[in-house]
Amino acid sequence: MSASTAISAPKTSRPGPRGPLLKLALRQYRLVALTLLLLALGAGAQIIHHYDGWADAIALRDHVGSQDYHFARYADDAHNMTARLLSDGTLLAFKPALFAALITGVLTAREWETGRVTLALAQSVSPRRWFTVRWATLAVLVSVPVVALVALYRISADHAYRLDLLTYGAERQNAYFTIGPVTVAYVLLGVAAGAVTATVLRRTWPTLIAAPALTWLLAALLVRSRAVVLVDFPLSSQVSGYHQGGVLGLQFYDLLPQDSYLLNSLHSGDYWPYQIASGAVVLAVAALLLLAAFRVLYRRIARP
C-alpha cells in the first residue's frame, strides 16, 4: 500500500505504550538532535562572549562619561554594544521557529511518503498516537535548546538595560523586549505549522516551502492585528498608529515581523505582561493548528 493510499485503521487495534514509540522517535531523530545541539552551542558561545564585553562598556563609560559613551563613537560604545546584543537576538528571534517548521514538516511528510504510517497500523499503533509522539519529540528537541539560549540572552539584555548601556530608541526596545517566552511560543507555532502542512500535503518538497511560509504568515498576521493589545488591555491605551510601509505594513527584526509603535510604547515593567500576552496568543494559534492537523489525519484514516 502506498503512502498516499487512504488508510483504514483496524477497529480492534488498541493504543500501545508510548515508551517504545518515544525511543524509536529519539533514535530516528538523533541526527536532528545533534544538529540542534551544535547550533545551540555556537549561539550560546556568542552570547556569553558578548556578555563579557559589558565590563569593557562600563569601563569606557566610567572613563569618558555617559554622554560620550552614548553619543560619541568608540569601539565599545553604546551603538556597538547594542548592535552586538541585536546580533545575538537575530539568532533567536524567529529563525528557530522557521527551522522547527521546516524539520517538522519535512520529517512528517516523509512519514507519508515512505509508508511508515502504514507500518504503524500493521503494528497496532494508531497514526494519531504515532504522530503525537513524533511531534511532541520534535517540539522538545527544538524548544529545550531555545529555552536555554533565551535565558542566556535575557541575562545579558537585562544586565545591559538595567545599567543603561544601550542606545535610546527603537534598537533598545527591540533588543530588550523581543526575546523571551514568546520566542519559545513561536517555536511551538513552527512545529504546529509543519505538522498541519505536511499532513495536508504529504509531500516533502511542497511542505519544505509551505511550512515556514505558513509560520511566517501567521506571525505577521498576529503582529499586524495587534492581538497582544487585545489580551493586555492596559496597554491598548498607550499605543496609537500603524506603520504604513513594508510587507503587510510591517517592520522587521531580522526575519521576525515587528510592530514598532507597540514596542516603542513599552516600559521595563511591561516586559513580562507583553511577553506572556504575546506567548498566550501564539500558543492559542499553535493549538488550533494542531487540532486542524489531527482532524485532517482522522479524515484520512477514516476514509474508506
Image (cartoon, rainbow, N blue to C red):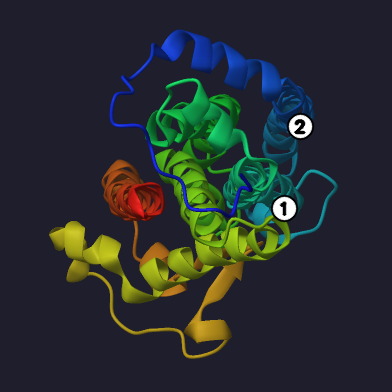
Going by the numbered disc 2, the residue's amino acid type is Leu
Label 2 and label 1: CA atoms lie apart by: 21 Å
- Camera-side residue of 254 and 65: 254
| Quadrant, the N terminus | top right
Residue 39 bears which disc, if any? 2
The residue located at (31%, 41%) in the rendering is: 272
- Rendering coords of residue 233 (x, y %): 14, 61
Looking at marks 2 and 1 on the same chain, the residue that comes earlier in the sequence is marked by 2
Q: Element under label 2?
A: helix
The residue located at (45%, 84%) in the rendering is: 243
Q: Which residue in the structure is indicated by mark 1? A: 83
| Quadrant, the C terminus | bottom left
- Rendering coords of residue 303 (x, y %): 36, 55
Going by the numbered disc 1, the residue's amino acid type is Ala
**Is 144 placed left or right of 50 in the picture?**
left
Say if 136 sits above or below 91 in the image.
Answer: above
- Camera-side residue of 41 and 21: 21
Q: Is there any visible trace of residue 147 in the rendered image?
A: no
Q: Residue furthest bottom?
A: 244
Q: Is there any visible trace of residue 182 in the rendered image?
A: yes
Q: Element under label 1?
A: helix
Residue 2 bears which disc, if any? none
Q: Residue furthest left?
A: 233
- Camera-side residue of 120 and 68: 120
**Is 186 placed left or right of 102 in the picture?**
left
Say if 201 sits above or below 18 in the image.
Answer: below
Few, some or many residues within 10 Å of mark 2 (<14, 14–19, 20+):
some
